[in-house]
Image (spheres, helix red, strand yellow):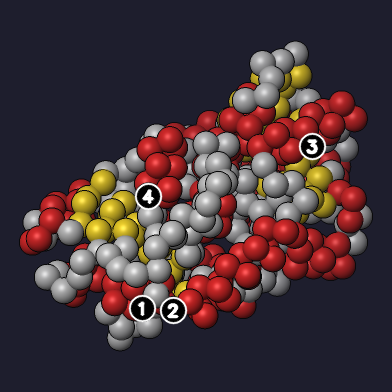
Amino acid sequence: MKKVLIFPLLDSMPSGHHQVANAIRDSILAYTGEIECLKVDILSEWNVSIEGGIVKTYLEWIRRFPGTYAWTYRRLAYRSRSERPHKVYELLFMKKVKDILNREQPDLIICTHGFPSLFINRLKQSGDCRVPALNVYTDFFINDVWGRSHIDYHFVPSMQVKNNLSARHQIAEEKIFITGIPISPEFSVNEEPSGGSDKPPFRIIMSGGSVGLGNIAEMLKAAEGKTECRIDVLCGANKKLYNEIRRLAGGFATAHPYISSREEMNRLYEESDALISKPGGVTVSEALRKEIPIFISSALPGQEQINLQLLDSMGLVFIIPEEANAIEFVCGVLGNKEKMAKFEQAAAEYRNTLEIKDARELFSTIEEMLERG
């Protein structure tokens, strides 16, 4: 039996890296029982207590000091001018990575985070790893942490990223596949667009990501008693937000704790006319698959800010102005046929550039990589 080893990062936080890893695993298992898929978190294997501490520190950092996090991310990850920090990571983790590879003996390595990719790239460069490796990028850009020069295959989010990867790093185009950001097979394409109505009351999903960040409570309080819309609020692990939403008057907003069921999430998408969210790669990709208009209310410092710039330039999102009443703004755009037609055209053009469009095609491509060895 062939074995696929998938490397995300930060096991105790339900991040996009893990969601993409799960989506790839599920896509493989949906079409065969003859390939073993194993997810391994390098940091958890190295020290599970430190991994949990890093997650808490990361969340506190972006909450309390977003400006310094954004500066650090851009300087050390997005466009790093020095490999010195990378050398430190290698000294800390490379032995653990070698131990995992020796233990598991995979036939294909898939990286959904830049750090595992960096380590695998170094091992392949030195000749210590001869296993084929695939990078699956989970944002709409590639930061400088990712290993590239000796990685065999690349799943990229857009034509722009493919062209940049090929030109800047001299990677053969046939090794690069435009997949979008892979999402779970449960998020099937609607037979008809989700946003079927062009008049209120609309049904809107509001999401702050897996930990419920953003200014969701403030947006809803501003709409309290002033809207006919029905709002489904995805609170993630944020219990304070969950309780705040439940106290709102009028029953126009329904609070949901973290939804682990992809079938339930798919149902919510199918019943909705719009999504208000942060520009996380997986959330945006799910909405694009479900053909739902995407409205951005806020962006976390660092990668989400960069995602937002790129998504806006492609016409794939609407940005809610800071001074606007968010719900009124969304309803106004949904009722504007010209704006909606422009969005639908941009979304269709983006989907048409995808070379791998669904879970079956993704599985077939990975199966070919395993056969090549």
The crowd level at tag 4 (other Cα within 10 Å; few <14, some 14-19, many 20+) is some
Of badges 3 and 4, the one in the foreground is: 4
Q: CA distance from mark 1 to mark 2?
A: 6 Å
Q: Residue at x 90, y 30 (%)?
A: 372
Residue marked by disc 4: 271
Residue marked by disc 2: 336
Contact between labelled residues 2 and 1, with CB atoms less than 8 Å apart: yes
Contact between labelled residues 4 and 3, with CB atoms less than 8 Å apart: no
The crowd level at tag 1 (other Cα within 10 Å; few <14, some 14-19, many 20+) is some
Q: Tell me the amino acid under the disc marked 2.
A: Asn
Of badges 2 and 3, the one in the foreground is: 2
Q: CA distance from mark 1 to mark 3?
A: 42 Å
Q: Tag 2's secondary structure?
A: loop
**Taking 237 as reference, is 288 above or below it?**
below
In the image: residue 319, left or right of residue 312: left
Residue marked by disc 3: 365
Q: CA distance from mark 3 to mark 4?
A: 32 Å
Quadrant assignment for the C terminus? top right
Q: CA distance from mark 2 to mark 3?
A: 40 Å
The picture places residue 29, in percent across and down from the top left corner, at 63, 24
Query: Can residue 14 be seen at all in this image of the molecule?
Result: no
Contact between labelled residues 4 and 2, with CB atoms less than 8 Å apart: no
Pointer 1 or 3: first along the chain:
1
Quadrant assignment for the N terminus? top right
Q: Tell me the amino acid under the disc marked 4.
A: Glu
Pointer 2 or 4: first along the chain:
4
